[in-house]
Image (cartoon, helix red, strand yellow):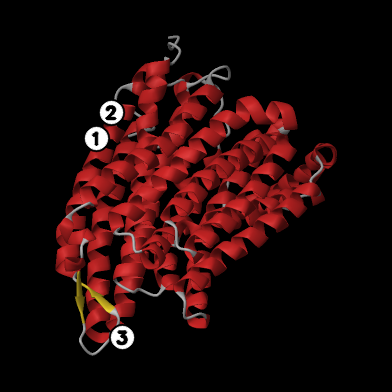
Amino acid sequence: MLKPKIKLFTMFRLGLFQMGLGIMSLLTLGVINRIMIDELTVLPWIAATAIAMYQFVSPARVWFGQLSDTKPIKGYHRTGYVWIGAILFTSLAFIALQVVWQLGSSIQATGWSWSSYAWAILLGVIFGGYGLALSISSTPFAAMLVDVSDEDNRSQLIGIVWSMLMVGIVVGAIVSSQLLNTPEICGQAILSYDPTATTKIANIPALKATVNPVFIIMPVVVLVMCFLATWGVESRYSRFGMRSQAVQREDQIGFKDALNVLTASRQTGLFFSFILILTLSLFMQDTVMEPYGGEVFGMCISETTQLNAFFGTGTLFGIASTGFLVVPRLGKQRTTKLGCILAVGCFVLIVLAGAFPSQSLLKSGLLFFGLASGMITAGATSLMLDLTVAETAGTFIGAWGLAQAIARGLSTVLGGVVLNFGKMVFTAPVLAYGLVFVIQGFGMILAIWLLGKVNIQEFRDNAKSALSVVIEGELDG
């Protein structure tokens, strides 16, 4: 039986799932990391490493993708997995927050004792579980996008769904900041002071009373959005059973295979290096931006949460305008280079904002950084598709995607490590945070240099033969 084409309304409905993921990323990277580093004085490298565990388990999505292909739940290959994963990751976000409170209480009571490290390790394990739950849900969801679409409307569907991710970050930032905007959490009552020390001691019970409800309300909203997004879509639109062979997707390649593909030739190696450095440089601030707003600018949690709205708005506008206005005029490679140059300028603005300090300059810097990030994302993604051999598109896109996921995890850890080092070297917080942004700027300059060496024609000439050697080696092994 011929399945109907997916309608625009259903595309936006599917986007509710990604919108929910945007809200969840805001809670983990925007709220939990701020509370740990600023309010609870958790060592930045420990906080960043614990949170990054959800990225480091991303190779497991290979198995979950294959599982949804071969083991349907109640007759459906995707929907059941999406719902199970959504129930798990929304629950684990709340559990992670409770472990954060225990970690903070342990640090206050005994400093960095064995119990504090045990709580930190447990937090990392929970975030690893959170990442697995995301894979259970998001990988079959990505496969569902392939199942319900055709070649002529797949790019439109993916574009809408991805954009909804950024909408989720913006909407989540606005709503969460309102929920967190209470006198208890924004006023001096949130802090008690040790009379024998000059450092602040967070009033954890007061923090819990305000933050815990947010981690109940928002995940429940996200869970409802996940159900609404996928309800009845697979049964009505999925072409999975009609296709003679599975369409190659990015979840069908493992880390070892990805590494072999990405180093198969000089050009794939160059672009892989560019993607790695670019990702590290673009996302190092993920775990330090909200603490930066709190420690250097004196912003409360609700105010630092709003910073994500400026970045997300800029990113949305950057992606939308780049595809229509910039790429047709400059080309993909020059567009990506321009985005990297603008990002360097934004890091300068963000550092200057802390030197004065000026909240308005910080927000402007983040808005323009979002614009630059959107330009980089649109340009680099288009370039990535040019650097993909058509006959093995699934393999290449899977390799690029998995490399980016691992690099995201590394960038999160690196941001925390650099901030930790900066706090050891500098007494002024602005210099410690500034070190992170300066290294990001130098990373962008290195990425520009690597991009200049990428040659699309050379890639196309050499990639097929290099990739065939890799695949033959895998078959022989």
* Looking at the image, residue 229 lies above or below residue 477: above
* Looking at the image, residue 458 lies above or below residue 39: above
Q: Which amino acid type is shown beneath numbered disc 3? A: Ser
* Residue 220 in view (yes/no): yes
Secondary structure type for disc 3: loop
Q: Which residue is painted at 73% across and 51% down in the image? A: 448
Q: Mark 2 points at which residue?
A: 228
Q: Residues within 10 Å of mark 1 (few under 14, many from 20)?
A: some
Q: Quadrant of the N terminus?
A: top left
Q: In this view, does 460 lie to the left or right of 33?
A: right
Q: What x and y, as percent, mark residue 173? A: 34, 45
Task: Looking at the image, tell me whether mark 1 or mark 3 is earlier in sequence order.
Answer: 3
Q: Name the residue under label 3.
A: 113
* Residue 387 in view (yes/no): no
Q: Residue furthest bottom?
A: 196
Q: Which amino acid type is shown beneath numbered disc 1? A: Val
Q: How crowded is mark 2: few (under 14 residues within 10 Å), some or many (20 or more)?
A: some
- Gap in angstroms between the C-alphas marked 2 and 3: 45 Å
Q: Which amino acid type is shown beneath numbered disc 2? A: Leu
Q: Which residue is painted at 45% across and 22% down in the image? A: 148
Q: What x and y, as percent, mark residue 189? A: 16, 67
Q: Residue 57 carries which label?
A: none
Task: Looking at the image, tell me whether mark 2 or mark 3 is earlier in sequence order.
Answer: 3
Q: In this view, does 240 lie to the left or right of 456?
A: left
Q: Mark 1 points at which residue?
A: 224
Q: In this view, does 50 lie to the left or right of 149?
A: left
